[in-house]
Amino acid sequence: MKSKFITLQLGIKKNKTDGLLICLSDNNNTQIISTLNKFAAAPIILSKKNISKSNPKYIFINSGNANACTGKEGLDNANAVLKLLALKLDCKKYEIIFMSTGIIGRQLPIEKICHAITNNKFNKYVSLKKSAMAIMTTDKFPKYSTKSYTIDSKKITFRGICKGAGMIEPNMATMLAFIETDVKINKGNLKKYLQYCSNLSFNSISVDGDMSTNDCVAFTSNNNVNLDLNNKKNLTKFLECATDFFISLSSLIVKDGEGATKIIELNIINSKSLMAAQKISRKISHSLLVKTAMYGQDPNWGRIIASLGSLDDLALNISKVKLFINDILCFSNGVPKDNGSKKLARSMKKNNIKIIIDLGVGKHSESLYFSDLSHEYVHINSAYTT
């Protein structure tokens, strides 16, 4: 049995679908990871408690209101929603995971939400696409995917939905995601696999360098396919497939980064330490000059080198640093190598840009996906609440 999806009109958004109930399979195993933001929203606080008590039966999501920075009233409202849902769905309130997304600092319109829940029969199931549409905020398009792979002659499938377009920062983003696989996985291993795949996907994307209060990713197994994951070869292949799916889904968030026109893949290689590679990737992906150069299709690789060199607590062997953009060597041994080539300028018109910085001093690497910065981003975020 697969998970099923029911959409709701909760009254947070006027005359729009703004709620989603995910009915998990009866024999599921589910785990979540969530934001590290110190002002984590009420639903995040409750969901972390709930997942520690029981395997969930449902995931409830509202869009349009984050229920973050709302104090005791916010927690009380979230608890009231869970209590009413538990009554309607004949389960315990701690068997429901709660996710919210939207504007920070506003109380939920609790009476409208409770009215909508009370009057919904919860018997009309919808498609993956409509489910993704129900959780959108500033997203320009619904983000959903289904993909199958073959391991050890067995077909396995992943499917998922996510939302997010702004406040995207490594260590989660202003995003929510639900991913389901049919491979049988126990809860302990599921948590490890979720963390592994998220570190290479949802924790490796950036739009504007801000970490949200509401980020949450749920990974569930409906346990329909028996695949021997004790077999090292099978496990390696499974993690490759799972990571591929996680990256493909999270890349949709970067593609839809508010006002974004490009996806930039940044690879830091041959670093002395992983920490140094991570620090460099964060610095460059957050650089407004680098991001605007990407938007302007400007082959000004000097902005990347300048950003790299501005890290005052990082030791660099300048003579060993190499910079590649779209597989074109731009800088090596402290001097330019592309000489203003037309080939590089033409390549900057692509929607997908690949940057490689080879530090030449070690064996560690880090990859991160980020978006450019456009006029539209400023327009969207300067008027978000109005």
Image: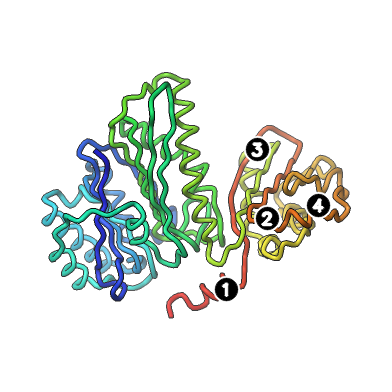
Depth check, mark 3 against mark 4: the one in front is 4
> Quadrant of the rendered structure where residue 225 is?
top left
Disc 1 on helix, strand or loop? Answer: helix
Residue for badge 2 = 350
Whole-angstrom CA distance, mark 4 to mark 1, is: 31 Å
Question: Badge 1, how many Cα within 10 Å: few under 14, some, many 20+?
Answer: few
Side of 208 where 188 appears, left or right: left
Question: Crowding near pointer 3: few (<14 within 10 Å), some, many (20+)?
Answer: some
Disc on res. 316: none
Q: How is the image coloured?
A: rainbow
Amino acid marked by disc 1: Val
Query: Which mark, by number, is residue 273?
Result: 3
Counting residues from the start of the chain, the first of labels 4 and 1 encountered is 4
Identified by mark 4, the residue type is Lys
The image position of residue 190, as x and y in percent, is: 36, 35
Q: Are dots 4 and 1 in contact, CB under 8 Å?
A: no
The residue carrying mark 1 is 378
Q: Which mark is residue 343?
A: 4
